[in-house]
Image (tube, rainbow, N blue to C red):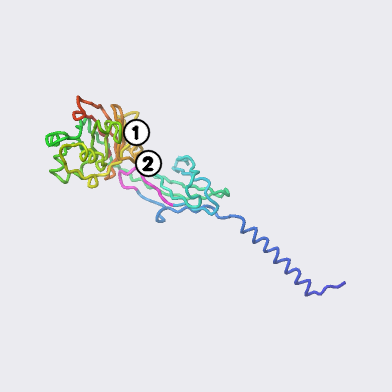
Amino acid sequence: MKMNMRKITNLFLALGVIAMMGVATSCEDTNTNPPVIEFLNGVNETTLDAGVTSYTIAGNISSDAGLDEVKLFKVTNAGETQMNDAITKFNDKNSFDFQFQITGISEDLTIKVQATDKDNLTASKNFMIHFTSGSTMTVETFPNITLDNYPNGPSTGTSHKLFLDLLTGDKYSQSELEADASLKDAIDVYFFRHSQFKSTDYPDFTIRSANNTGLKDLYDTYQNYQPVYVPADMNNTKVGIVDVSDWNSLDVATIESLAGSVSNSATADLDAGYFVAFETSSGNQGVIKVESVTPGDTYLSSTITVSVKVIK
């Protein structure tokens, strides 16, 4: 039996279309797009100023299939080293905003950001950091600074020096602050101790950022006079208790690493031998060593003695 040639042709065309549809459907079901890594503002290279040994790399990673892990590598002339534990938890598996702080930079290096998705597709992108030699940054030390407790009246307001400029080691009283408005730009932290706060909101022997509201709360609630203290006008200093194994050998890179991890505005229950890393509102980083604490006969007579190392 003969078949009409036109029918045969149409049959093959139909089969071909069906086959192509199958291939197309199969292709649509398979993800072939690896993660996309973009650095902030499209910038993938920077040159550090002289004396700068840290840099924060930021950007976004997007993924059609969903991210499985993100890794960070430091690439130097000596080879490639993974810098962090793989990040495997994401608030949004399809879009991850990242910030990686690189510290202790002492040579040109490449930072490789690597991302792998749920389909095991991997992408990476490099960020170049150019180190500028001839560093002018040094660590300055201010030893054995004794800070007085809060004032409770005009007399102690003049004599009790509880405020500290971490860049100079200078200390100031409440009366000096009220008499010289420019001091609000110099004062970085303050010290106080108060029995009312010991077991409630404010623990014993505390060093706080100048803009922390604790001192203003104390003035407003428990004092017999009303000194002028506006936390919102004061410097914002980040502080936090850290471990230090060798105080005398603290260098720029170590201090940067310690201070880069703190983000609080207050410390709690300080005692002799404690260390507090800090970063001032001007970006200067350092470490405070608690040399001694003196409870005194009364809370008002309590003092704390500290030494300060700061990068300048």
- Looking at the picture, tell me which residue is in the foreground, 152 or 161: 152
Residue where numbered disc 1 is placed: 242
- Looking at the picture, tell me which residue is in the foreground, 277 or 149: 149
The quarter of the image holding the N terminus is: bottom right
Q: Is residue 54 magenta?
A: yes
In the image, the segment drawn in magenta is: 48-59
Compared across the picture, whether 143 is left or right of 240 comes to left
Query: At 68% from the left edge and 61% from the top edge, which residue is drawn?
Result: 22
Which of pointers 1 and 2 lies earlier in the amino acid sequence? 2
Compared across the picture, whether 286 is left or right of 117 comes to left
User: Disc 1 versus disc 2: distance between alpha carbons?
Assistant: 17 Å
The quarter of the image holding the C terminus is: top left
- Looking at the picture, tell me which residue is in the foreground, 108 or 161: 161
The numbered disc on residue 42 is: none
Residue where numbered disc 2 is placed: 103
Query: At 81% from the left edge and 75% from the top edge, which residue is drawn?
Result: 4
Compared across the picture, whether 94 is left or right of 201 comes to right
Under tag 2, what secondary structure?
A: loop
Rendering coords of residue 308 (x, y %): 25, 34
Q: Is residue 57 magenta?
A: yes
